[in-house]
């Protein structure tokens, strides 16, 4: 029988098979072969693509190697979104491997943040963890931790060390026994069909009547268009987290504890239901 | 009577069972045919060498 704790491992060890191809207009001295890699769903593109950069650098002139950026079917991929979220949002229901195009020229300033070093990723990651704890525990848990604990969270993610990460992260997932969950659920809802980057509002895990709030309750309140009544008995949208579609009856507190990304946020993608 | 007793826990667990099942399907879909791909993060193994 599967245990709830096994979900944490499944989430952590999720991988996306990816094929990186250099953009046709990049200048090379030799032909650039594609590069194949298993990307961790929970990590960040610029954190796990050193090998990709090295691979393409080898066939380029040194002066043409500038800041690397990635694109999928014309969409620049935001490195500060977790990889699994990028895939669910832009490439769900497509054939694997995921085909990502690698660029060095023409950095899309209006779409992407610069990522000059891994320190920038660490700062972004820790800012998210702190924001999540502000919502869950009024920042009490993260503020009581030591600097070395913060570092352990980051190093656990960076080096793909599940036990190292969860030894600390479990404290961020606790709540007082007299409560039925966190103060508020840290979540972000993404849709490719809108200009808005994401929806984030205050939402409690337990309703005023004491009932546990579900994923369906959350969507009805903050993004009703995602769960509009079915047309001709067919769903209009898919609600995805980590490549799966949890039932709308799933309690958000359980989802937050078991299916948050390492930044402690639930990143939920709403994508149009494929027609075929 | 036993049926009515068993309905409630089964219903409560439906969302949980569905998550377990979908995660295992996801692993099949995203990993089964691609296990020969290189991992992005190496799981480094430290080997301590020294003289006796």
Image (cartoon, rainbow, N blue to C red):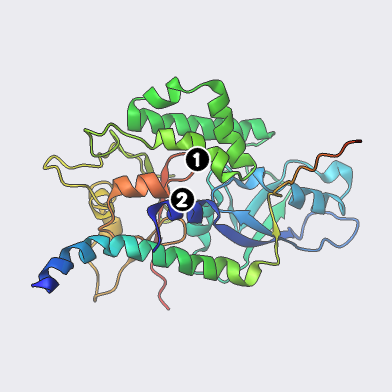
Q: Quadrant of the C terminus of chain A?
A: bottom left
Q: Which of B28 and A272 is in front in this view?
A: B28
Callout 2 secondary element: helix
| Quadrant in the rendering for residue A183 | top left
Mark number, residue A166: 1
Disc 2 from disc 1: Cα separation? 9 Å
Q: Are marks 2 and 1 in contact (CB under 8 Å)?
A: yes
* Badge 2 density bin: few <14, some 14–19, many ≥20, Cα 10 Å: some
Q: Name the residue under label 2.
A: A8
Name the subunit of mark 2. Answer: A
Residue A220 horizontal side relative to residue A100, left or right = left
Placement of A195 over or under A114, stated as above or below: below
Reading the chain from its start, which is encountered first: label 2 or label 1?
Answer: 2
Q: Residue at x 29, y 73 (%)?
A: A234
Any part of residue A189 in sight? no
Name the subunit of mark 1. Answer: A
Q: Nearer the viewer, residue B48 or A32?
A: B48
Residue A239 at x, y percent in the picture: 36, 59
* Badge 1 density bin: few <14, some 14–19, many ≥20, Cα 10 Å: some
Mark number, residue B49: none
Q: Nearer the viewer, residue A64 or A5?
A: A5
Q: In which quarter of the image is the N terminus of chain A?
A: bottom left
Residue A87 at x, y percent in the picture: 53, 57
């Amino acid at each position: 029988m599967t245990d709830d704790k096994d979900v944490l491992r499944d989430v952590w060890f999720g991988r996306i098979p990816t094929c990186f191809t250099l953009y046709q207009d990049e200048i090379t001295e030799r032909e650039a072969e594609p590069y194949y890699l298993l990307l961790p769903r929970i990590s960040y593109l610029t954190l796990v693509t050193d090998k990709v950069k090295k691979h393409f650098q080898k066939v380029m002139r040194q002066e043409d190697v500038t800041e690397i950026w990635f694109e999928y079917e014309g969409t620049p991929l935001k490195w500060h979104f977790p990889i699994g979220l990028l895939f669910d949002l832009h490439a769900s229901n497509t054939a694997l491997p995921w085909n990502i195009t690698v660029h060095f020229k023409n950095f899309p300033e209006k779409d992407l943040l610069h990522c000059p070093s891994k320190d920038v990723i660490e700062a972004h990651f820790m800012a998210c963890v702190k924001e999540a704890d502000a919502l869950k525990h009024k920042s009490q848990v993260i503020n009581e931790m030591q600097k070395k604990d913060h570092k352990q969270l980051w190093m656990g993610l960076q080096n793909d060390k599940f036990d190292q990460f969860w030894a600390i992260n479990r404290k961020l997932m606790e709540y007082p026994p007299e409560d039925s969950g966190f103060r508020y659920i840290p979540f972000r809802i993404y849709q490719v069909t809108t200009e808005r980057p994401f929806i984030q509002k205050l939402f409690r895990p337990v309703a005023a009547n004491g009932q546990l709030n579900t994923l369906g309750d959350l969507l009805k309140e903050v993004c009703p268009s995602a769960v509009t009544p079915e047309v001709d008995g067919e769903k209009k949208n898919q609600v995805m987290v980590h490549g799966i579609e949890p039932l709308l009856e799933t309690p958000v507190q359980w989802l937050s504890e078991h299916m948050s990304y390492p930044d402690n946020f639930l990143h939920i993608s709403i994508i149009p239901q494929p027609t075929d | 009577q036993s049926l009515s007793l068993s309905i409630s826990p089964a219903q409560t667990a439906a969302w949980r069972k569905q998550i377990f099942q979908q995660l295992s399907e996801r692993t099949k879909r995203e990993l089964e045919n691609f296990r020969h791909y290189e991992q992005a993060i190496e799981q480094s193994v430290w080997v301590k060498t020294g003289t006796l």
